[in-house]
Amino acid sequence: MKASELKNKSMEELTAKAAELSQELFNLRFQLHTGRLENTAKISSVKKDIARIKTILSEKRG
């Protein structure tokens, strides 16, 4: 997900997307610890997407 795509979304959409990605991150971590996760790079990708969303949210607020 690119930052330019995120800048066009509303704050409500970004907040919802951040919550969705946080839930996905939880599920990925759970899969990692149970030994079911095959693509471990997905965790860092989701974390970076969450960080991008939080950065854009703070830019829009400030």
Image (tube, grey):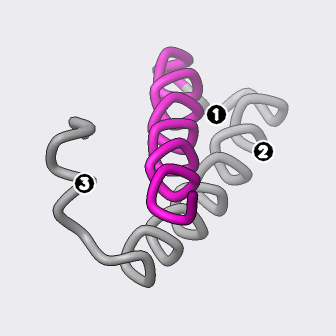
Query: Which residue shows up at 59% across the image and 29% down it?
Result: 37
Q: Secondary structure at mark 3?
A: helix
Query: Which residue shows up at 17% across the image and 62% down it?
Result: 8
Sequence-wise, the earlier of marks 2 and 3 is: 3
Of badges 2 and 3, the one in the foreground is 3
Q: Residue most toward the top? A: 41
Query: Which residue shows up at 31% across the image and 77% down it?
Result: 10
Task: Residue under label 2, please give it.
Answer: 30
Query: How far is the residue under mark 1 from the one under mark 3?
Result: 34 Å
Sequence-wise, the earlier of marks 1 and 3 is: 3
Callout 2, which amino acid? Phe
Q: Quadrant of residue 34?
A: top right
Callout 1, which amino acid? Arg
Crowding near pointer 2: few (<14 within 10 Å), some, many (20+)? Answer: few
Image location of residue 32, percent across then percent down: 73, 29
Sequence-wise, the earlier of marks 1 and 2 is: 2
Q: Quadrant of residue 61?
A: bottom right
Task: Residue under label 3, please give it.
Answer: 7
23 lies above or below 4: below
Of badges 1 and 2, the one in the foreground is 2
Asked if residue 45 is among those painted magenta in the image, a careful observer would answer yes
Q: Which residues are magenta?
A: 38-62
Task: Residue under label 1, please give it.
Answer: 36
Asked if residue 7 is among those painted magenta in the image, a careful observer would answer no
